[in-house]
Amino acid sequence: MAETFEKLNRLLERAAALQTAMVLFEWDNETLAPKGAALHTAKMIGSLSEQYMEIVTSAELADLIKTCRKEGGLTGLQEAVVRETEEEISRWKDIPVAEYRAFRELVSRATGIWAKAREENDFASFAPVLREIISCQKRFAACRAKEGQSLYDVMLGDYEKGFDTEILDDFFRELRENIVPLLREASERSQKIRTDFLSADYPVSAQERAARFLAEYVGFSFDRGVLSVSAHPFTTNLHNHDVRITTHYGKRIDSSVFSVIHEAGHALYELGIRDDLTQTPVGQGASMGMHECQSRFYENIIGRSRAFWEPIYGKIGEIFGEPLASTPLDDFMAAVNRAVPGLIRTEADELSYGLHILVRYEIEKMLIGGELDVDHLPEVWNGKYREYLGICPESDSQGVLQDIHWSQGSFGYFPSYALGSAFGAQIYYHMKEEIPVEDLLREGKLGDIREYLRDRIHQYGKLKDSRAILRDVTGEDFSPRYYIRYLKEKYGA
Ligand code: ZN
């Protein structure tokens, strides 16, 4: 057995090396690479990705897995490595290679077409390529669907194992019934809150200093991580000793402040994964949703709490200078917790965010289920924004064209954002029963909170899926009621 697993390991190491190289190229593309490099670099990425596919779909890998299973006697970690590898193989094995390559090309063309369409507010120019992407993704999902499984459920499973439309329909119904009226009330109160001190021409150098300070304050390690700048903030990791986050600096300081805390939350997850797991197929966060759970926990649940800011608000005021320095903490807290429905998902407040995801979930379900044609997308989109958020985009650029995801073929991805917030609330209420979260925040002892999350979640990587983590940490399966309770306690009158 040991010998077979050793052989498997060596092959997986080659796959991991290729993946790491791709990740590094992608990081470089978004941060440092010159603009003109993209096309040429895409060739290298294409070749690396083909080599990766060759390993994953090879007879050698399939045989090794089979032998491992037959010989048995796997340790817990080995068992998980074999399981993750089997899942990766089944993700690719039935998809015709030529068709997949054509799809990659289609997608790289589509993101360009989408960007131009968004800039020129021209949905019609994006519609044909979007239709093509949807039909490819449906074909791929059909190759992999188990008997009786819907195509959208196949896609959802890629991002959140153990979640399907049955669970999500209930979850989003709860959100719709509770958040829509709550947002209406909260938004009325929020109109009076002043925010002028958040956008007062603070120099980028001050924003940079604050970003580094906050990343370090929540526990991001600059010995094992990098902070850089990109158009859209993101986190990427090569292994648990090299985790990279980005942010952006704009007019409003709350945008960079909270995006740094958010990305640092992602990074802490990857940095907390055990040494014996990193660089193996289980050496990453459990799922998209569990990742968003960590980032949103830091950004919103603790990052927007008064207790978090009490020990550091003076220091932050010093870094930014006037007018923030003389703004009372209560005014700052009110400003960063305003809830006002807006058109753009990435700028949404904590309360209305879930409704942006609700719109996308309902639309994706219809698109993949064949109940909605791409041509009618803008009117359906606008109708749902009117119904749930009480506002309507004046242009498709501000509406259906705002997100890159569909142009990349990512269907089933959006729900993870909302699930992450809900996981976070469920874990938070349980955490409060075990450790004095507010007192720790007030005393600046974020290490205790980080340890809690590392012990119970981070260290395990993909050894457990998100539902198993929730069960082990909170003693119950996923339940949306904590999220609703959290939002009601925070935003209710
Ligand atoms: Zn995130």
Image (cartoon, rainbow, N blue to C red):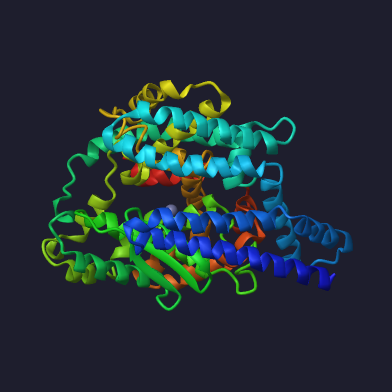
Q: Is residue 292 depicted above or below 28 in this figure?
A: above
Most distant residue in the bottom direction? 223
Rendered residue at 57%/53% (across/down): 287
Q: Nearer the viewer, residue 316 or 328?
A: 316
Quadrant assignment, res 459: bottom right
Most distant residue in the right direction? 71
> Quadrant location of the C terminus?
top left
Q: Position of residue 422 (x, y in %)?
A: 49, 47
Left or right position of 138 against 341: right
Q: Is residue 197 depicted above or below 149 in this figure?
A: below
Q: Position of residue 130 (x, y in %)?
A: 46, 32
Q: Position of residue 172 (x, y in %)?
A: 50, 34
Q: Is residue 435 visible?
A: no
Q: Is residue 443 depicted above or below 166 in this figure?
A: below
Q: Nearer the viewer, residue 115 or 50?
A: 50
Rendered residue at 57%/68% (across/down): 273
Rendered residue at 16%/64% (across/down): 203
Q: Nearer the viewer, residue 68 or 436?
A: 68
Q: Nearer the viewer, residue 173 or 321?
A: 321
Q: Position of residue 190 (x, y in %)?
A: 23, 41
Count of marks placed on residues: 0
Q: Is residue 70 visible?
A: yes
> Quadrant location of the N terminus?
bottom right
Rendered residue at 60%/43% (across/down): 100
